[in-house]
Amino acid sequence: MDWVTFLPPLAYLISLLLVAYALRDQNRSDSDYFLAGRKIRSVPAILSVVANETSVATVMIFPAAGFKSDYVLLWLV
């Protein structure tokens, strides 16, 4: 394989680490991170749940359904 193939994922991972390092805050606790400081409203919470369910469907369900149906599902996209 060519090294250029690994360049975009590597750049993404490095940028992800740099952003996480730049945005870190030493005064926050684990409950602030995992529970959003218990300040998140209902609409952003619902959007977060829908986004997570959609990403799971994209990664797990659609490829399996596409392989099973000879890529007929691709036309729906």
Image (cartoon, rainbow, N blue to C red):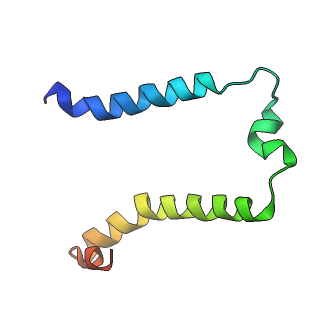
In the image, is 1 to the left or to the right of 48?
A: left
From this view, report whether residue 25 is shown above or below residue 75.
above
- Residue at left offset 29%, top offset 71%: 66
- Residue at left offset 23%, top offset 73%: 71
Residue situated in front as seen by the camera: 55 or 37: 37
Q: Quadrant of residue 36?
A: top right
- Residue at left offset 60%, top offset 22%: 21
Name the spot of residue 30 as percent of width and height, x first: 79, 32
Screen quadrant of the C terminus: bottom left
Name the spot of residue 24 as percent of width and height, x first: 68, 25
In the image, is 1 to the left or to the right of 7?
A: left
Residue occupying the far right of the picture: 38
From this view, report whether residue 25 is shown above or below residue 12.
above
Residue situated in front as seen by the camera: 66 or 47: 47
From this view, report whether residue 1 is shown above or below residue 39.
above
Name the spot of residue 70 as percent of width and height, x first: 20, 75
Screen quadrant of the N terminus: top left
Q: How many marks?
A: 0
